[in-house]
Image (cartoon, rainbow, N blue to C red):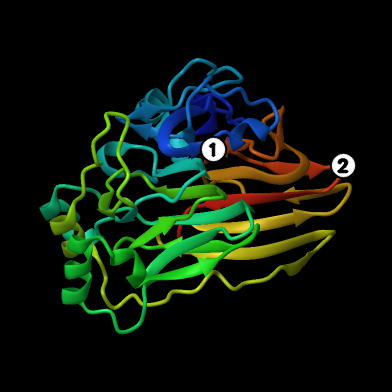
C-alpha cells in the first residue's frame, strides 16, 4: 500500500548516478550518450543505472533526495517508491543496466526459481533491447534443436559447446526475453538496454578460452550450469511484436508481459504527450529523440541513454516531447 501523501514527501522523477563496471569484454560506446564521462583507460562493459545490490547501490542525482542511496529510500520509504513491490531482502525489484559488448560475453545461464536456492544463487530473468548492433552482431540464445544433455556436457568439457547454441543475427530495435534457465550470451558489437530481476548470479558454461586481468582463465561453473539449463528450450525467437496506434500521436510496441515486469516501447510524435498511469512504480529509458518526464512539479530531461524512475506515489506523471522520441517504459508485472 502507498502511504498517505500527507505523511510522506511528494513524489518526483528520480535520476541516479550511473555505476560503471569494468569488464574484459567491454568497450567505450557508452561515452556516446549525452552527458556521459566514462572512467579513463578501462573497458566499460556495464553501466548500472538503477541498482540496489550489495555489489553496488545507486545514489540519487537530483531533487530533495539528492545524495541519498536507493537502499535508504527502500528502507525508509519502500511503499512510496515501489508500491510494495520488492525483491529478496526488501530490495528494489529490478536491476537496470546498459551493456556495451565489444567482444562476445561468456556462454552462461542463470538458475531458475525452482533450483536457485539449492544451488546457492538467485534466479535471474532479463530482457535485452538492442540499441545498436554492428554488422554481423549476434545473440546466442537457447539450444539448437536435437541437442542432448549428454552432448552438451561432453562438448562443454572439450571446448566446442558454442556450436550447440542457437544464434540470431540482430539489428537495432531487436528484443530478446531471457527467462531463468535459458542458456545465452550477448555477442560482440551490441549496445543493449537490459532490465532484469534483482540478481547477479551467473554460471559460466564457456568463455571462449579467454584469460582475465590476472592472466588466468576465468572460472567456469559446469556443474551448476547443467543443473540450471532448460534443455527443452530450443531456438527461441526474438520478440515479434510491432507498433500499435495508441491515438494522439502515440504508438506502443508491447515487448514483455511477465510476472516480474512489463515493458513497452513508446513512440511519441512531434509535440505530443504520454500520460502514464499513476500509482505504480515505472522506469523510463530514452532510446532516441528528446523528451522530458514531469511529476509533482518537477521536470527532468529524458534523452538517449537517460533513465528516470517514477515512484509509485506519483499522481499525474507525464512524458512530453517537442521533437519526437522513443522511450522504453518498465512497470510491474502481471500474472
Image: 168 above or below 287: below
| Residue at left offset 42%, top offset 26% | 73
The answer to which quarter of the image holds residue 335 is bottom left
Mark 2 or 1: in front is: 2
Q: Position of residue 166 (x, y in %)?
A: 41, 72
The answer to which quarter of the image holds residue 321 is top right
Image: 234 above or below 64: below
Answer with left or right where residue 278 lies relative to residue 272. Answer: left
| Residue at left offset 20%, top offset 63% | 158
Nearest to N terminus: mark 2 or mark 1: 1
Q: Position of residue 135 (x, y in %)?
A: 64, 58
| Residue at left offset 17%, top offset 57% | 222
Q: Which residue is mark 1?
A: 313
Residue 62 in view (yes/no): yes
Q: Which residue is mark 2?
A: 322
What is the C-alpha distance between the residues marked 2 and 1? 27 Å
Amino acid at each position: 500500500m502507498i502511504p498517505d501523501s500527507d505523511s510522506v514527501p511528494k513524489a518526483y522523477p528520480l535520476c541516479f548516478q550511473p555505476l560503471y563496471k569494468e569488464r574484459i569484454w567491454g568497450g567505450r560506446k557508452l561515452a556516446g550518450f549525452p552527458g556521459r564521462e566514462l572512467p579513463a583507460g578501462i573497458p566499460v562493459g556495464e553501466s548500472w543505472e538503477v541498482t540496489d545490490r550489495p555489489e553496488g547501490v545507486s545514489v540519487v542525482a537530483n531533487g530533495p533526495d539528492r545524495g541519498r542511496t536507493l537502499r535508504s529510500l527502500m528502507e525508509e520509504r519502500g511503499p512510496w517508491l515501489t508500491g510494495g513491490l520488492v525483491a529478496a531482502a526488501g530490495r528494489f525489484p529490478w536491476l537496470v543496466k546498459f551493456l556495451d559488448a565489444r567482444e562476445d560475453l561468456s556462454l552462461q545461464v542463470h538458475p531458475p526459481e525452482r533450483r536457485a536456492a539449492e544451488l546457492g544463487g538467485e534466479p535471474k530473468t532479463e530482457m535485452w533491447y538492442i540499441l545498436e548492433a554492428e554488422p554481423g552482431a549476434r545473440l546466442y540464445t537457447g539450444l539448437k534443436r536435437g541437442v542432448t544433455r549428454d552432448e552438451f556436457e561432453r562438448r562443454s568439457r572439450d571446448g566446442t559447446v558454442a556450436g550447440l547454441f542457437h544464434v540470431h543475427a540482430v539489428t537495432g530495435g531487436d528484443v530478446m526475453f531471457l527467462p531463468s534457465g535459458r542458456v545465452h550470451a550477448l555477442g560482440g558489437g551490441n549496445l543493449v538496454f537490459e532490465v532484469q530481476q534483482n540478481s547477479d548470479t551467473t554460471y559460466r558454461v564457456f568463455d571462449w578460452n579467454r584469460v582475465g586481468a590476472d592472466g588466468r582463465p576465468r572460472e567456469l561453473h559446469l556443474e551448476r550450469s547443467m543443473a540450471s539449463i532448460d534443455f527443452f528450450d530450443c531456438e527461441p525467437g526474438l520478440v515479434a511484436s510491432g507498433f500499435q496506434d495508441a491515438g494522439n500521436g502515440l504508438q506502443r510496441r508491447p515487448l514483455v508481459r511477465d510476472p516480474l515486469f512489463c515493458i513497452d516501447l513508446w513512440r511519441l510524435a512531434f509535440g505530443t504527450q504520454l500520460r502514464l498511469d499513476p500509482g505504480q512504480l515505472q522506469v523510463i529509458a530514452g532510446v532516441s529523440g528528446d523528451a522530458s518526464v514531469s511529476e509533482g512539479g518537477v521536470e527532468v530531461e529524458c534523452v538517449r541513454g537517460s533513465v528516470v524512475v517514477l515512484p509509485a506515489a506519483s499522481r499525474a506523471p507525464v512524458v512530453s516531447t517537442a521533437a519526437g522520441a522513443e522511450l522504453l517504459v518498465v512497470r510491474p508485472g502481471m500474472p
